[in-house]
Amino acid sequence: QSALTQPASVSGSPGQSITISCTGTSSDVGGYNHVSWYQQHPGKAPKLLIYDVSNRPSGVSYRFSGSKSGNTASLTISGLQAEDEADYYCNSYTSSITGVFGGGTKLTVL
Amino acid sequence: EVQLLESGGGLVQPGGSLRLSCAASGFTFSNYAMNWVRQAPGKGLEWVSGISGSGRDTYSPDSVKGRFTISRDNSKNTLYLEMNSLRAEDTAVYYCARPTVTTYITAFDFWGQGTMVTVSS
């Protein structure tokens, strides 16, 4: 099972919006609505931001939103803040009854 | 409060074995599928294994199939990962993770603090 494809890095200024893409295949992202997104700060465990493509767990800021089109899922962060600087990972259920993560995207807030 | 506490990590030689444990509390353990996720130093996340709430069904990627075995003891609220034939590339922090929906093997809303496994001679 190959990792999902994410851009290695993205950047944005405070207050701006950015989008991180996550590309898979019809056997994972495109075939199921079980895509989730995580934020990880250095030395910390990941934090769930989005599950089932666009659902936010309680306590997660409305500034984080998710969507999907075909084999590509996206995470959008609006109103960028300094504390959003972190690594972001997507994850999907697959037809092999496994889970697969993306390679991760480093977000820099300029 | 949901808590997941991993233990059992350490230094092991290539070809060796190790058993990780994850003690769970704060929720009805047997209701939830549970998972192991690892992260090699400076690298991304990798899903390692999943197990259904009853323990009857297990899931793993080809990278660990035949070498790693996930299991659970619902009477002890504990998740295990038995790792055999360890390789240098298995060096990572291993996290125990609970899904947000009971039956899922994805969408992890609670994570342990992780336990480090180092495979080296």
Image (cartoon, rainbow, N blue to C red):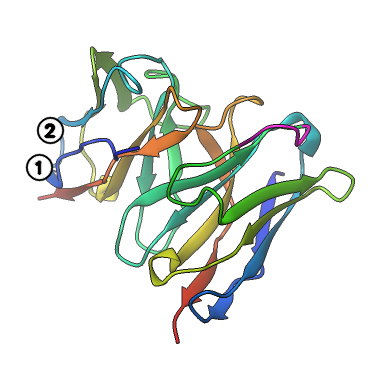
Subunit under mark 1? A
Q: Magenta includes B62? A: no
Q: Residue at point 29% right, 39% down?
A: A2
Q: Is residue A52 above or below residue A44?
A: above
Residue under numbered circle 1:
A13
Quadrant assignment for the C terminus of chain B: bottom left
Residue sticking out furthest to the bottom: B121
Name the foreground residue: B47 vs B67.
B67
From the top left corner, tell me how far across and down residue B103 is, in percent: 64, 24
Residue type, label 2: Gln
Q: Which residues are magenta?
A: B54-58
- Classified by dominant secondary structure, the portion drawn in magenta counts as loop
Q: Residue at point 28% right, 45% down?
A: A84
Asked if the residue at tag 2 contacts the one at tag 1, i.e. Cβ–Cβ closer than 8 Å, the answer is: yes
Name the foreground residue: A78 vs A73.
A73
Q: Magenta includes B56? A: yes
Q: Is residue A53 left or right of residue B16?
A: left
Residue type, label 1: Ser
Quadrant assignment for the N terminus of chain B: top right
From the top left corner, tell me how far across and down residue B46 is, in percent: 41, 48
Q: Secondary structure at mark 2?
A: loop
Subunit under mark 2? A
Q: Is residue B20 left or right of residue B62?
A: right
